């Protein structure tokens, strides 16, 4: 198992799970044309949960989290986010997008905008936040991810790890209640993985509800309250991390763990 070396002790006591439901998915199915990519997904996420989703490439992990902020459309079943059901109603989609932040493997920053402009764009144009206030909020979150001094540079002038921290800060500027991460460290060199994981750990300590697709099993052990294993479009198994890693139930989970640990 990869050891996660951290700058600080993780304080799990601050990571409280409430009874309030943040995301509820019921018997959800999705197809890409003829291809049945997600099968009967049932999932309840309570506020404050830190869920790690893992599974082989092509198992539907990205599709699942993209359905949660409606970057992809599901064809049957229900997805309810913060009490709003995801339907084709655009009003619902806007509401959900403003409450759910997403961070991708490739940081998707706008290359022709400065770091500060990347962070203020959506607050100014979507939230109608006055520019000065949006800039103050952006600087607050850039300080939080420890790169305020980069504010006036362009993405291409930053390292991959710094760019990913900007992407996280940019999401936080919209004040989301839920954060989705899709392999946020997979495109990074090893020495930069830790700085991004550290940022994610701090978010967890502040009580953020997080769904993270990642193969960083050290992170899963340290931070997650639940690990979900997917294969071939299904949730095969889920458990709290200790049980999940020490006592996997299905053969598919055992095989997967034997390959990555
Ligand atoms: P994972 O993130 O677990 O690697 P994905 O959710 O990206 O898996 O993909 C699941 C399956 O759906 C894969 O077989 C992939 O090839 C297929 N797929 C993903 N996106 C599309 C798409 N836009 N059109 C058709 N097939 C897709
Ligand atoms: Mg993926």
Image: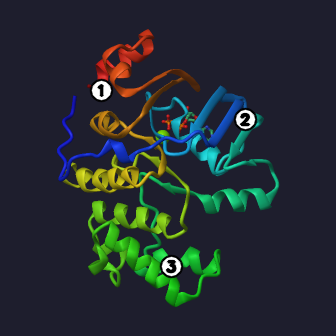
Q: Residues within 10 Å of mark 2 (few under 14, many from 20)?
A: few
In the rendered structure, find residue 112 and report the number of the disc placed on it. Answer: none
* Residue behind mark 3: 120
Asked whether, in this view, residue 64 is left or right of residue 223, the answer is right
Q: Residues within 10 Å of mark 1 (few under 14, many from 20)?
A: few
The residue mark sitting in front, 3 or 2, is 3
Percent x, y of residue 134: 51, 82
CA gap between label 2 and label 1 equals 31 Å
Judged from the image, the secondary structure of the residue bearing numbered disc 2 is loop
Q: Nearer the viewer, residue 243 or 216?
A: 243
Q: Earlier in the sequence, mark 3 or mark 1?
A: 3
Q: Residue at x 42, y 67 (%)?
A: 169
* Residue behind mark 1: 260
* Residue behind mark 2: 33
Judged from the image, the secondary structure of the residue bearing numbered disc 1 is helix
Task: Locate residue 151: give its quadrant.
Answer: bottom left
The residue mark sitting in front, 2 or 1, is 1
CA gap between label 3 and label 1 equals 38 Å
Residue furthest toward the bottom?
132
Q: Nearer the viewer, residue 62 or 14?
A: 14
Question: Could one spot residue 113 in this view of the protein?
Answer: no
Task: Locate residue 196: give its quadrant.
Answer: bottom left
Question: Could one spot residue 92 in this view of the protein?
Answer: yes
């Amino acid at each position: 198992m990869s050891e996660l070396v951290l700058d600080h002790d993780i304080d799990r006591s601050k990571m409280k799970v409430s009874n309030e439901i943040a995301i509820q998915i019921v018997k959800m199915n999705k197809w890409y044309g003829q291809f049945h990519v997600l099968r009967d997904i049932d999932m309840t996420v309570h506020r404050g949960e830190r869920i790690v989703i893992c599974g082989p490439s092509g198992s539907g992990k990205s599709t699942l989290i993209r359905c949660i902020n409606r970057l992809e459309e599901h064809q049957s079943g229900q997805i309810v986010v913060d009490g709003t059901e995801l339907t084709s109603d655009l009003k619902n989609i806007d509401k959900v997008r403003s409450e759910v932040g997403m961070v991708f493997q490739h940081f998707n920053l706008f290359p022709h905008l400065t770091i500060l402009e990347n962070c203020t764009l959506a607050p100014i144009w979507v939230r109608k936040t006055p520019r000065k206030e949006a800039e103050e909020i952006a600087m607050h979150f850039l300080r939080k991810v420890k790169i305020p001094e980069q504010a006036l540079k362009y993405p291409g002038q930053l390292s991959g790890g710094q760019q990913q921290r900007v992407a996280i800060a940019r999401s936080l500027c919209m004040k989301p209640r839920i954060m989705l991460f899709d392999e946020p460290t997979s495109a990074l060199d090893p020495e930069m993985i830790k700085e991004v994981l550290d940022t994610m750990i701090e978010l967890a300590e502040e009580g953020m509800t997080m769904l993270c697709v990642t193969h960083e099993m050290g992170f899963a052990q340290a931070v997650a309250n639940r690990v979900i294993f997917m294969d071939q479009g299904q949730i095969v198994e889920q458990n709290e991390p200790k049980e999940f890693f020490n006592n996997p139930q299905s053969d598919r989970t055992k095989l997967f763990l034997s390959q990555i640990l």
